[in-house]
Amino acid sequence: MNPVAAPRDVQAVVVNYNAGPKLLDCVRALLDQPGLGRVWVSDNASRDGSIEALEGLAAAEPRLRILHNGRNLGFGAANNLALRSDAAADWLLVNPDCLLEPGALEALLRCRREHPRAGLMGGLVRNPDGSEQRGCRRDLPRLGASLARSMGLSRFFGRRAWTDFDHTGGPLPAAPVQVGAVSGALMYLRAEALAATGIFDEGYFLHCEDLDLCRRMADEGWEVMFVPDAAAVHFQGTSSRRTPLRVHWHKHRSMWRYYAKFDARGHSVFLNALVWAGIWTRFLLTVPGAVLGASASAWQP
């Protein structure tokens, strides 16, 4: 298969926070993708030696750039530091524990060429066991799904009674298809679309900033596409395994921000209060498991 020529320079950005050895594997897989220019690693003050290990590769690889942020800026803000460096480029965003398979970028570029209104594209993100990871093709959040998930009601009513926006539904398509949202672990951003919608909302520290960007793309008339031939393996949670309670807190804070930003205006004060209460009740229910998870991680070598 001949590589599909990039319409312009395509750059990649990886936000790192204590991703360990997976970071080096991620960057090497990116550098092996035909048609990719620079690879930016935006590091949020990692202390696990992952950046020190990467610096040896950077010394020999002129396409690799490392941004030392000095503190943990969160996902969106750390991505934005790289995105602001070249507003004319298309960007490929990849999590540090996500390994692109050969031909992934070529598949995204084909979709870009064949779908002129494709502003944001994602690929087939797999778990290490080969199964499709939840969230790599999904609907945008709906009020019913938010209430059901936040208050634990979906277990009683089932998915058919609610729109489960994290659920991957149906057989894998044979060609790119339009979806509501894709996974933030692997996102391709078209320069013109990014200029129209703006970069990440830095009011999110972690979680939901990918949904926010997908929502704004759709609101501006751009298509969000799922590209099944753009495949990657995602070792989910590598960076957050040792701080699960903090991650859960940011996740629920981001859920409320997303709802308040896009949906609250169309509903009553009572209903908005119910959603807020549901989100934070859900958080409180996750605390015991998160604390136990943190304790277990502390004993791991």
Image (cartoon, grey):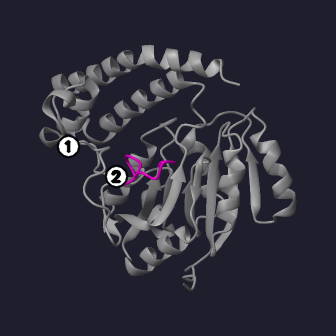
> Does dot 1 land on a helix, a strand or a loop?
loop
The residue closer to the viewer here, 44 or 229, is 229
Query: Residue at point 44% right, 80% down?
Result: 113
Query: Residue at point 58% right, 15% down?
Result: 295
Earlier along the polypeptide chain: callout 1 or callout 2? 1
Query: Residue at point 35% right, 70% down?
Result: 176
Asked if residue 161 lies left or right of residue 109, the reply is: left
Task: Examine the rendered structure and indicate whether residue 280 appears above or below residue 32.
Answer: above
Which three-letter amino acid code belongs to the residue tagged 2? Arg
Q: Is the stretch drawn in magenta largely helix, strand or loop? A: loop
Task: Examine the rendered structure and indicate whether residue 280 appears above or below residue 12.
Answer: above
- Please tell me how many numbered marks the rendered image carries: 2
Could you classify mark 1 by the number of other residues whose Cα lies within 10 Å: few (under 14), some (14-19), or many (20 or more)?
Answer: many
**Residue position for label 1:** 163
Whole-percent x and y of residue 7?
A: 55, 80
Asked if residue 285 lies left or right of residue 94, the reply is: left
**Residue position for label 2:** 215
Q: Are marks 1 and 2 in contact (CB under 8 Å)?
A: no
Whole-percent x and y of residue 212?
A: 39, 47
- The magenta-colored residue range is 127-137
> Does dot 2 land on a helix, a strand or a loop?
helix
Quadrant in the rendering for residue 294? top right
Whole-percent x and y of residue 272?
A: 22, 27
